[in-house]
């Protein structure tokens, strides 16, 4: 995302403390797909909150209330915030082989090597988000480089993400569990377990940044492949855009529960 943010934007910034790598044993998600974008509104506990399953919350919606955040939601409330976007920032180290004729792709993961001043290295910076404006995009300006939801976490025949009070929005074959396995068909994937619904209303979705090819262009002399050997559409070939492109972005998977 560009650094020249509009002064009218409001962002909720999440800080992540990375304590070390661990083996991932969750679902083998598809690459995010713009055709999987859904929107809905949280309206439990006197709140109205518009959201998309891209991680973006609210909007200003001049002259209207459809896409905003309001409390109390009883006809007397006021707009609380403008748009809210999740920001994930990171720096990646790529080893420089000191050969200008080759593309540098080797990721430096060892902390000692990162701090070793004798090793020549590049620094690749990411600021990943999803927002309605000021996004980096592909050269033809037809695709924003950010978070998109993968299919699998909602019923694609519906116009909403999975909502706890609407079973017809839940994934038909069950919820992604581990690898290609699913679980709890016909039951809500609740925060506290199968079918558990303590809140007035819940939503649950996932997004990833696989479609972000910003550091994988033909002109890039440093390339970052977060998931070598994985490609957009290698699990679901009917992805609607960038089929066959390498899995891009920072390699981030965002699991969201509202």
Image (tube, rainbow, N blue to C red):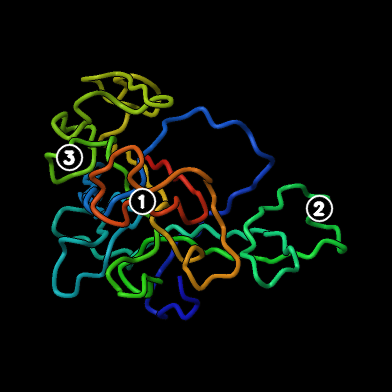
Disc 3 + disc 2, Cβ < 8 Å:
no
Cα separation, mark 1 vs mark 3, equals 22 Å
Q: Earlier in the sequence, mark 3 or mark 2?
A: 2
Secondary element at tag 3: loop
Apparent side of residue 132 relative to residue 255 in the rendered image (left or right): left
Please report the residue visible at 42 percent of the width from the left and 33 percent of the height from the top.
Answer: 28
Q: Secondary structure at mark 1?
A: loop
- For label 1, the residue is 244
On the rendered structure, is 111 left or right of 150?
Answer: right
Which residue is the site of mark 2?
Answer: 113
First in sequence, mark 1 or 2: give its number. 2
CA neighbours of label 2 inside 10 A, class few (<14), some (14 to 19), many (20+): some
Q: How dense is the environment of label 1, judged by Cα within 10 Å: few (below 14), some, or many (20 and up)?
A: few
Q: Which residue is mark 3?
A: 156
Can you tell which of label 1 and label 3 is closer to the viewer? Answer: 1
2 versus 230 height, above or below: below
Where's residue 54, x and y in %?
33, 53
Left or right, 38 with respect to 57, comes to: left
């Amino acid at each position: 995302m560009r650094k020249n943010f509009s002064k009218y934007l409001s962002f909720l910034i999440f800080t992540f403390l990375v304590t070390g790598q661990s083996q991932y044993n969750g679902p083998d998600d598809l690459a995010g797909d713009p055709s999987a974008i859904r929107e809905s509104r949280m309206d439990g506990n006197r709140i109205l909150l518009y959201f998309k399953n891209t991680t973006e919350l609210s909007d200003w919606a001049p002259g209207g209330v459809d896409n905003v955040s309001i409390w109390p939601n009883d006809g007397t409330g006021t707009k609380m915030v403008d748009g809210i976007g999740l920001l994930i920032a990171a720096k990646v180290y790529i080893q420089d082989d000191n050969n200008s004729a080759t593309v540098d792709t080797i990721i430096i993961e060892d902390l000692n090597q990162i701090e070793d001043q004798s090793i020549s290295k590049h620094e690749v910076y990411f600021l990943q988000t999803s927002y309605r404006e000021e996004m980096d995009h592909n050269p033809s300006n037809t695709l924003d480089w950010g978070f998109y939801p993968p299919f699998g976490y909602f019923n694609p025949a519906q116009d909403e993400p999975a909502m706890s009070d609407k079973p017809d929005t839940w994934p038909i074959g069950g919820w992604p569990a581990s690898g290609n396995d699913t679980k709890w068909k016909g039951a809500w994937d609740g925060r506290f377990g199968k079918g558990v619904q303590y809140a007035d209303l819940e939503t649950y979705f996932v997004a990833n940044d696989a479609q972000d090819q910003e550091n994988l262009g033909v002109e890039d002399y440093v390339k970052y492949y977060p998931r070598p050997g994985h490609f957009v559409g290698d699990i679901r070939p009917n992805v609607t855009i960038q089929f066959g492109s390498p899995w891009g972005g920072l390699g981030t998977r965002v699991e969201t529960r509202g």
